[in-house]
């Protein structure tokens, strides 16, 4: 075959071309080429075997470069030596395989060079070439594991432990009645109260561990088998599964806001769980899990669950109850024994009870199996525990909303003592034990509703019976604890708490403070002025005499007619324009004046004492200064101020406890997950001596026994109290007490429409079908009905016998001048004194010992007030300062149930 007809040159390092040339040289073909020296490449027959057959250049069909290479390797002493390819110049290869001068593209490969991955496998034929060697398999496996470790390491390093999600720590505040039973959980969107691990029973921890994660205290936080199973199910579209360990469930509930079941979330959950398992203690994980898990009945966390199902604190759960609650973690809808048919008809009560019992028994058996419970204890629990029916504790209707507001107000307004700020209340997690007696709260509400239903008919009498409201409060004199209030018809509809400050004047219920001031400090000496008059006083006896005359001309303590800045006199009227006592002096003692609620006597007594001392006596009894009006006008003594029902009950409680004043309070104790936050300590102050307080009580007994308050008499015990009716018949009160309980009831008409910025107290003439509302009518009736029930079952306690006190003022007879024509002329207001007036009403002399008493005053025009107010206005400013006689309800005062700052 001619040279130019051969195939194109093959690669320089040999192959089939080199093999053919070697074969040609050894057989002495006529191609003219010389054979390579012997030993340079080995025997051609050894290298190629029968590489050719037939004529020259005819190639075997199965030959090739790879086969030639292998042949060269075998013949080269075990090395990978190739035959040298003659250069194009026709020079021979160097002997022994040494590189010759013509060597270039035909040089042999370096000896010992191997492929990094022998695949397909060299030296194997057919299928065997494609079967990987064990070395390759082992290498790949090790590489795969190494990659996983690297990925896990990078993921672990890159992932951070997220903060506990806010929704997992959102909590309610829980309010409790005085007896420790739960009143309501409110204050947040989530019914949860976080508690420490020490407050979680060990049995609860063991129940969860036994049922869900027996290796909790030894594992790394994840269950590889569980994760693999979950990943496989999600990848293949099967049923999704959550984390299987307690740590994973804690991470899911408390640290991952995303609750979706996806592959990415599963991997994220896995890495976080491992990291949480190494950075957070197991006890903290357990507490976090039990505090964040959902148990059904809108209860998040073990404490809320214990209350929802068993109405007890978590620490008091027994082994059976713990096993039951552990069962609800499987899915509360199907394990709540009360049933959840509204969610799923299959979750009826009967089916749920069976499921819950089976799951509970299984949990108890596992607790025994794992050594967490003895067989003897386990044998006690073969039935479901006694569970409570579901309750909607978040309801703030009825009186509950008022009670919660009152407790919150007490805590915040006394935050320096309670350590509870408004911010802390918003954060939740507080357990607040109040002073409220559940039974008494209901009895007070029922008493109000009974009277209201029977008498107040807005449909029949829209002009007189609309906007009628009641308020009330009941205080324990021994402690100051507020036992009950009535804030209004419904806290979700009527937002003002009528037991708190409303702006309603208290009227004649203020008179006991005037009497107490007279007996504590006494009246001033009319012959002295300034500091001397303040220092030299005469203590007043209840037997002291004062004028009960209607339209009495009021004088200052020295006997001068009192005038306002415009020179106008003050002529005090009595309720019903009635005079008391024998004319012309109309003298009555203070006991009778209190019994018949005679305004003129107490207004003049207040002037003789000094209105500053009357105010001080009210404050000493427990009335807040912020609820008291100014002392510029004589009417201050007959109740132009607006204390709350709570403070009035608390102030009268001071008399009930023989002068010992204890501020009303509504919260006994506050705790959170870390323990006690606040505990009330009763502070007792002596507002009045027992002689003063007991004499006030003795006088107030007369009011109920045979005075204006007879409708408040109780069947089996003594009562002391006082009625009160205000100017224009805009409010009416009854405040009374026994040694065990002090209660106030207020009634008024007020349009609460929030759009009305100037809320006005409306007159109550004709309200309830009565000509006029007095404290002795509906308020005293409510007081009576409530106290009969509230004190039922308690032993009657008599009031202390009062010791004699003070001096009988105005006991010396005074001359009685004959009437003069000028008497009848004084039926109209006189801006300045007339000569005849001075003849009729001479200034008392020291020998008369009147101490400001108007011995022969015949009175004047109708410029005074009714029972506790001012009928006419001597000055344009009087309505704002002195009587609030326009009915404006924007009174001042603080949150009651405790001092307001």
Image (tube, rainbow, N blue to C red):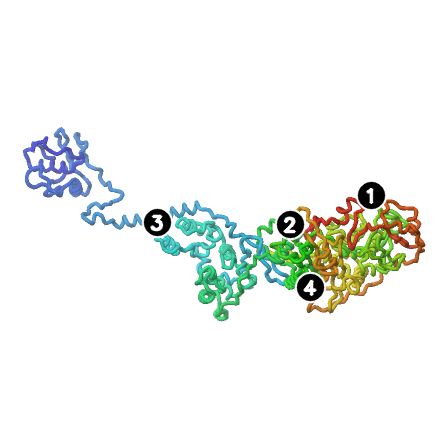
> SS for tag 1?
loop
In this view of the protein, which residue sits in the foreground, 460 or 178? Answer: 460
Q: Which mark is residue 753?
A: 2
Name the front one of labels 3 and 4: 4
- Mark closest to the chain's N terminus, 1 or 3: 3
Alpha-carbon distance for marks 3 and 4?
81 Å
Q: Local crowd at mark 3 within 10 Å, few (<14), some, or many (≥20)? A: few
Q: Which residue is mark 3?
A: 145
In this view of the protein, which residue sits in the foreground, 680 or 508? Answer: 508
Alpha-carbon distance for marks 2 and 1?
37 Å
Alpha-carbon distance for marks 4 and 1?
47 Å
Alpha-carbon distance for marks 2 and 3?
75 Å
Q: Are marks 3 and 4 in contact (CB under 8 Å)?
A: no
Residue 577: percent from left, percent from top = 82, 55
| One can see residue 418 in this view | no
Q: Which mark is residue 565?
A: 1
- Mark closest to the chain's N terminus, 2 or 1: 1
> SS for tag 3?
helix
> SS for tag 4?
helix
Name the front one of labels 2 and 3: 2
């Amino acid at each position: 075959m001619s040279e130019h007809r051969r195939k194109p040159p093959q690669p320089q390092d040999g192959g089939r071309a080199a093999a053919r040339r070697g074969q040609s040289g050894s057989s002495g073909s006529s191609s003219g080429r010389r054979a390579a020296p012997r030993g340079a490449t080995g025997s051609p027959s050894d290298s190629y075997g029968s590489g050719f057959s037939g004529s020259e250049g005819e190639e075997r069909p199965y030959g090739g470069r790879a086969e030639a290479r292998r042949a060269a390797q075998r013949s080269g002493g075990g090395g990978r030596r190739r035959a040298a390819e003659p250069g194009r110049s026709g020079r021979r290869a160097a002997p022994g395989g040494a590189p010759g001068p013509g060597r270039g593209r035909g040089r042999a490969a370096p000896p010992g060079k191997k492929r990094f991955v022998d695949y397909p496998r060299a030296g194997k034929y057919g299928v065997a070439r494609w079967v990987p060697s064990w070395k390759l398999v082992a290498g790949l496996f090790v590489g795969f594991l190494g990659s996983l470790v690297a990925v896990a390491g990078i993921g672990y390093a890159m992932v951070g432990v997220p903060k506990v999600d806010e929704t997992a720590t959102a909590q309610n505040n829980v309010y409790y009645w005085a007896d420790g039973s739960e009143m309501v959980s409110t204050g947040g969107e989530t019914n949860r109260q976080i508690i420490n691990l020490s407050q979680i029973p060990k049995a609860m921890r063991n129940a969860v561990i036994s049922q869900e994660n027996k290796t909790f205290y030894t594992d790394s936080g994840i269950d590889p088998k569980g994760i693999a199973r979950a990943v496989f199910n999600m990848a293949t579209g099967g049923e999704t599964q959550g984390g299987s360990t307690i740590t994973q469930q804690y991470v899911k509930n408390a640290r991952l806001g995303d609750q979706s079941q996806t592959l990415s979330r599963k991997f994220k959950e896995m890495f976080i769980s491992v990291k949480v398992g190494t950075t957070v203690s197991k006890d903290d994980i357990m507490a976090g899990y039990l505090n964040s898990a959902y148990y059904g009945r809108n209860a998040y966390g073990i404490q809320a669950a214990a209350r929802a199902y068993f109405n007890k604190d978590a620490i008091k759960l027994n082994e059976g109850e713990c096993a039951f609650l552990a069962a609800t973690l499987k899915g509360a809808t199907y394990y709540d024994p009360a049933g959840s048919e509204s969610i799923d008809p299959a979750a009826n009560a009967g089916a749920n009870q069976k499921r819950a019992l089976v799951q509970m028994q299984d949990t108890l058996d596992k607790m025994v199996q794992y050594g967490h419970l003895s067989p003897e204890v386990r044998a006690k629990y073969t039935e479901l525990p006694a569970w409570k029916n579901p309750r909607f504790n978040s309801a703030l209707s009825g009186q509950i909303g008022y009670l919660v507001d009152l407790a919150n107000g007490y805590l915040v307004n006394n935050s320096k003592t309670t350590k509870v700020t408004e911010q802390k209340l918003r954060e939740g997690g507080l357990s607040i034990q109040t002073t409220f007696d559940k039974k008494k709260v209901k009895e007070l509400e029922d008493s109000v509703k009974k009277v209201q239903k029977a008498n107040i008919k807005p449909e029949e009498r829209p002009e007189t019976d609309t906007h009628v409201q009641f308020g009330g409060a009941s205080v324990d004199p021994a402690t100051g604890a507020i036992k009950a209030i009535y804030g209004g018809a419904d806290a979700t509809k009527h937002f003002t708490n009528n037991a708190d400050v409303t702006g309603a004047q208290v009227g004649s219920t203020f008179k006991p403070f005037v009497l107490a001031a007279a007996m504590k400090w006494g009246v001033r000496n009319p012959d002295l002025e300034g500091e001397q008059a303040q220092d030299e006083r005469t203590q007043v006896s209840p037997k002291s005499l004062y004028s009960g005359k209607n339209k009495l001309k009021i004088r200052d303590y020295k006997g001068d007619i009192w005038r306002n800045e415009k020179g106008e006199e003050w002529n005090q009227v009595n309720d019903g324009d009635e005079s008391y006592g024998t004319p012309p002096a109309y003298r009555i003692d203070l006991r009778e004046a209190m019994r018949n609620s005679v305004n003129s006597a107490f207004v003049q007594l207040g002037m003789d004492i000094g209105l500053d001392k009357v105010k001080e006596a009210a404050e000493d009894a427990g009335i807040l200064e912020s609820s008291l009006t100014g002392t510029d006008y004589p009417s201050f003594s007959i109740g132009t101020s607006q204390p709350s029902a709570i403070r009035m009950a608390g102030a009268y409680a001071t008399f009930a406890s023989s002068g010992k004043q204890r501020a009303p309070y509504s919260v006994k104790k506050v705790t959170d997950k870390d323990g006690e936050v606040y505990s009330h300590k009763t502070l007792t102050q002596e507002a009045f001596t027992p002689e003063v307080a007991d004499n006030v009580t003795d006088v107030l007994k007369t009011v109920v026994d045979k005075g204006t308050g007879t409708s408040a008499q109780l069947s089996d015990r003594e009562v002391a109290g006082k009625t009160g009716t205000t100017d224009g018949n805009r409010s009416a009160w009854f405040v009374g007490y026994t040694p065990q309980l002090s209660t106030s009831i207020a009634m008024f008409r007020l349009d609460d429409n929030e759009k009305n910025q100037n809320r006005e107290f409306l007159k109550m003439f004709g309200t309830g079908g009565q000509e006029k509302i007095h404290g002795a009518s509906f308020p005293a009736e409510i007081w009576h009905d409530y106290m009969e029930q509230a004190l039922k079952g308690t032993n009657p306690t008599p009031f202390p016998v009062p010791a004699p006190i003070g001096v009988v003022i105005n006991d010396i007879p005074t001359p009685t001048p004959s009437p003069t024509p000028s008497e009848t002329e004084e039926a109209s207001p006189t801006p300045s004194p007339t000569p005849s007036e001075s003849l009729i009403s001479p200034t008392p002399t020291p020998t008369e010992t009147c101490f400001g008493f108007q011995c022969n005053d015949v009175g004047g025009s109708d410029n005074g007030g009714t029972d506790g107010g001012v009928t006419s206005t001597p000055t344009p400013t009087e309505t704002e300062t002195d009587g609030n006689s326009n009915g404006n309800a924007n009174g001042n005062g603080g949150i009651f149930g405790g001092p307001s700052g």
